[in-house]
Image (cartoon, rainbow, N blue to C red):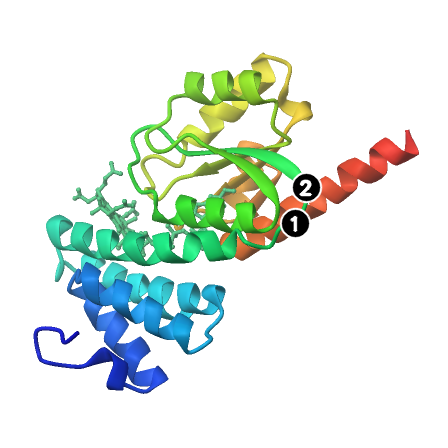
C-alpha cells in the first residue's frame, strides 16, 4: 500500500522504513504504522527492536515538537493512536515467552493524568517477562490503588505520571499505604518522563524506573530478593 506521497513502504530498506515510520507517527498515520510494523516483522526484526527504534523513538520526536508548540493536542492524539496500533500488533509477540509467572503487579497512571502509552509499554514488557499485571488504566485516585491491592495482593505496585503537576500524587498513594500499615508488604516502583531517582527517594518509593526494560529488570531483582528471603526464613 502507498501512503499520501505514493511511497511504497515495502520497497524501502530497513533504515528508510524506520525513518518513514517516524514521519508517519508524526503525521498520525495509523494504517501506515501498522503496515510498517508487519513489514519489519516479516524481515525478522525482534518485536522489542521495532518497539524501541521505530515507535518509541518516533514518539520522542513528536514530544519535542509538542513541547515547542509546533504540534498540538489533537495532532499528538493522532500520533498516540498510531503508536498504540503498532503496539497492539507487538503486544502478543512480546508476551509470547511462555515464562512461568514470576510475580504480580498492579499498575496505573495517577489521578489527573491521562498519559498511558508508557504505562502500557511497561505492562506489555512485564507480561512478556512472565509477570501477571493488573492494569488500572489512567487517572487513578488513591482508593483505586488501595482497592486493587486489597483484591489482588500484588508483589509490586507500579505508578506512572507524565506531568510535573501529577507526579506529587504518587506520594499521596505511598503515604496512604503507610497509614494502612501495608507499605512494607509491597514494592513500589515509579516511572514517567519527569521523574528521577531523587524524586522517587523523596516520596518513599522503592525504585525509579527510567524505562520499561529497567522496570522489568528492577521488578525481577525485587522478586529474586523476596524468594531468597523466603528461602532463608
Ligand atoms: Co502530554 N505532555 N499533555 N499528551 N505528552 C507531555 C508529558 C509533555 C512533556 C509534552 C511537552 O511539553 N514536551 C508535557 C508535560 C510537561 C510537564 O508536566 N512538565 C505534556 C502536557 C503539558 C500535556 C497537557 C497538559 C497538554 C494540554 O492539554 N495543554 C495534556 C495533559 C492531559 C492530562 O494528562 N491531564 C497532555 C495531553 C497529551 C495527549 C492526550 C495529547 C497525549 C497522551 C496520549 C496517551 O497517552 N494516550 C500526550 C502525549 C502523547 C505526550 C508526549 C508527547 C509523549 C508521551 C509518551 O507517550 N511518550 C509527552 C512528551 C514526552 O514525554 N517527551 C507529553 C512515549 C512513552 C513510551 O514514554 O510515557 O515516558 P513515557 O514512558 C516510558 C518511561 O517514562 C517509563 O517507561 C516508559 C516506556 O519506556 N515509564 C514507567 C512510564 N511510566 C512508568 C511506570 C513504571 C515504570 C516506568 O512503573 C513501574
State the residue in front, 196 or 161: 161
* Residue at 18% in and 81% down: 8
Q: Residue 19 placed where, x, y %? A: 28, 78
Name the quadrant containing residue 33: bottom left
Q: Which mark is residue 102?
A: 2
User: Which residue does the numbered mark 1 point to in the structure image?
Assistant: 99
Asked whether residue 132 is in view, the answer is yes
Name the quadrant containing residue 227: top right
Q: Is mark 1 within 8 Å of ligand 1?
A: no
Q: How many marks are shown on the rendered structure?
A: 2
* 66 vs 186: above or below: below
The image quadrant where one finds the N terminus is bottom left
Q: Residue furthest top?
A: 180
Q: Are marks 1 and 2 in contact (CB under 8 Å)?
A: yes
State the residue in front, 95 or 215: 95
* Residue at 61% in and 34% down: 104
Amino acid at each position: 500500500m502507498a501512503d499520501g506521497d505514493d511511497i511504497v513502504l515495502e520497497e524501502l530498506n530497513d533504515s528508510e522504513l524506520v525513518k518513514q515510520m517516524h514521519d508517519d507517527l508524526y503525521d498520525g498515520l495509523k494504517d501506515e504504522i501498522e503496515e510498517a510494523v508487519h513489514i519489519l516483522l516479516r524481515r525478522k526484526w525482534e518485536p522489542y527492536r521495532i518497539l524501541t527504534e521505530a515507535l518509541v523513538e518516533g514518539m520522542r520526536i513528536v514530544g519535542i515538537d509538542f513541547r515547542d508548540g509546533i504540534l498540538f493536542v489533537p495532532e499528538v492524539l493522532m500520533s498516540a493512536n498510531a503508536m498504540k496500533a503498532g503496539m497492539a500488533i507487538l503486544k502478543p509477540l512480546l508476551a509470547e515467552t511462555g515464562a512461568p509467572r514470576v510475580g504480580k503487579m498492579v499498575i496505573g497512571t495517577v489521578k489527573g493524568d491521562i498519559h498511558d502509552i508508557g504505562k502500557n509499554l511497561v505492562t506489555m514488557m512485564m507480561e512478556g517477562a512472565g509477570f501477571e499485571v493488573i492494569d488500572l488504566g489512567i487517572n487513578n485516585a488513591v482508593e483505586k490503588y488501595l482497592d486493587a491491592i486489597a483484591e489482588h495482593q500484588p508483589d509490586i505496585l507500579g505508578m506512572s505520571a507524565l506531568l510535573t503537576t501529577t507526579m506529587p500524587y504518587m506520594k499521596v498513594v505511598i503515604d496512604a499505604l503507610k497509614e494502612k500499615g501495608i507499605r512494607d508488604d509491597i514494592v513500589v516502583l515509579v516511572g514517567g518522563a519527569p521523574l528521577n531517582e531523587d524524586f522517587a527517594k523523596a516520596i518513599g518509593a522503592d525504585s525509579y524506573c527510567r524505562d520499561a526494560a529497567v522496570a522489568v529488570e528492577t521488578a525481577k531483582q525485587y522478586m529474586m530478593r523476596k524468594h531468597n528471603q523466603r528461602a532463608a526464613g
